[in-house]
Amino acid sequence: MSDARELLAIREIAHAFLLAEHPGDVQQFALDRVTPLLGATFSLVMQLSADGELLRPVAQHEWPAAYRQWIGALRVRVGDGPSGVAVAERRLVEVVDLFEDPALDGWYDVARELGFRSILVAPLVIADEPIGAVAFYFADATRVTDEQRALVRLVADQLAAATDKSRRADELRRANAALAEANAELEEQARQWQAAQRARDASETLVVDAMLSLTDEHDGRPAADRLQAAHTLAVAAREYVEVTQPSLTLQPTDVDPRRALLEAVSLWRTRAPMVPVQVDEPTVILPTMRADSRWLPRTIDLVLGLAVAGAATEGGQARAGIRLGRGFLTIQLSWDGRSMFDGPSGDRQTRAADILRVCPDALRWHAHDPYADARRWVSAVDLPLARALASRQGGELRIETAGAPDVTREMLLVFPVDVDHG
């Protein structure tokens, strides 16, 4: 399987995600496109029941004809067999030769009847919760490549996102139907649902547009580099879905903001050593923050990455620092270089909510671009993801974009903090 064929498959699935009205459309298209690409004999998408105990088929490709009429009655218990284990443990499960695994002897008869020997299963996961699985079956003992595993994971992410999109649309329709008899509180809730839906739809469009650009068959950049950028985009898109779920629960703990910032600086110095990152050490003792130890560092990582991408020009540099105020702590990330955002002009300081998107040209690189590594690790969805993360953690992302091209740009992450703590 070549990188070019994989990129074409990703591109076509992204098209289907953008145009399809129902998750089943994307599921069927993905199976029809990816199954032969992997060399699998047949494949299946399964959906998890409401009680979280059973998987049932919702789409199939080339399921053995003799058993196709009974496929609707098929049920797999979570934790049982490769598909059940993939969902229970939320991980990719690969069985190279089922008949060589005594632990799977209960599946020997099924495998003989259906005609498969190997199986590759990926769970469909939204916000760390499984909603189903996609399984590919091979007639012969087959050991898949790392590239094939990456493709299956990416397809699983797309299928999960399509299902989540459909569910959110159903929730929005139910909220709108309830407006007829709702009171003012319910009307306000519906407006919030609609605003959240618009934000998610806008971000989904950013993701699909970026994915289509990266997988353009006429793009002359190395396929491996574009594939890495596509995987970076997929991770950020999956995180955006997770952090915008109402059910997201943060795990506050004591976090040293200086250490979190220095770890992000170290990461970007490794990723993009051609872009200098200067650290302005705080002149006062900083208090610890009550923050989620996973999401605060990720937020800083995303915003610093945008600054590094902006500084990826001749003579450009990024700067990072922390300022302590009365009741708040500000992480400052600035850069000399190119403009990064499309948004309204006029006011010197623009709220992040008013910024439409990261300029597509700011993230583009060419085949021999010395700053390619500073851009390939940044995705079109990093800005809305950072904004959502800051908001969920009780903070705010502010962006300064006004001025001539040689004027320093600046982004501020502002969080409330107990100055007596620490």
Image (cartoon, rainbow, N blue to C red):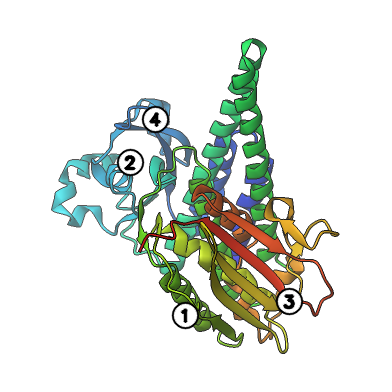
Which label was assigned to residue 408? 3
Closer to the eye: label 2 or 4: 4
Question: Which residue does the image show at 39% across and 30% down from the upper left?
Answer: 71
Q: Can residue 262 be seen in this view?
A: yes
Amino acid type at mark 1: Ser
Q: Earlier in the sequence, mark 3 or mark 4?
A: 4
Q: Name the residue under label 2.
A: 114
Q: Decide which of 14, 268 is in the foreground and name it.
A: 268
Q: Which of marks 2 and 3 is nearer the N terminus?
A: 2
Q: Mark 4 points at which residue?
A: 71
Contact between marks 3 and 4 (CB within 8 A): the answer is no
Q: Which of marks 1 and 2 is nearer the N terminus?
A: 2
Amino acid type at mark 3: Thr
Question: What is the crowding at mark 3: few (fewer than 14 residues within 10 Å), some, or many (at least 20)?
Answer: many
Q: Name the residue under label 1.
A: 266
Q: Decide which of 124, 252 is in the foreground and name it.
A: 252
Amino acid type at mark 4: Ile
Residue 300 location (% of width, % of height)? 52, 66
Q: How far apart are marks 3 and 4 (CA)?
A: 61 Å
Question: Which residue does the image show at 86% across and 59% down from the upper left?
Answer: 346
Question: What is the crowding at mark 4: few (fewer than 14 residues within 10 Å), some, or many (at least 20)?
Answer: some
Closer to the eye: label 2 or 3: 3
Q: Is residue 343 left or right of residue 378?
A: right
- Please tell me in which quadrant of the rendered image residue 185 appears: top right
Residue 374 location (% of width, % of height)? 61, 78
Secondary structure at numbered mark 2: helix
Q: Earlier in the sequence, mark 2 or mark 4?
A: 4
Look at the image and tell me in which quarter the C terminus lies. bottom left
Q: Distance between the residues labelled 1 and 2?
A: 52 Å
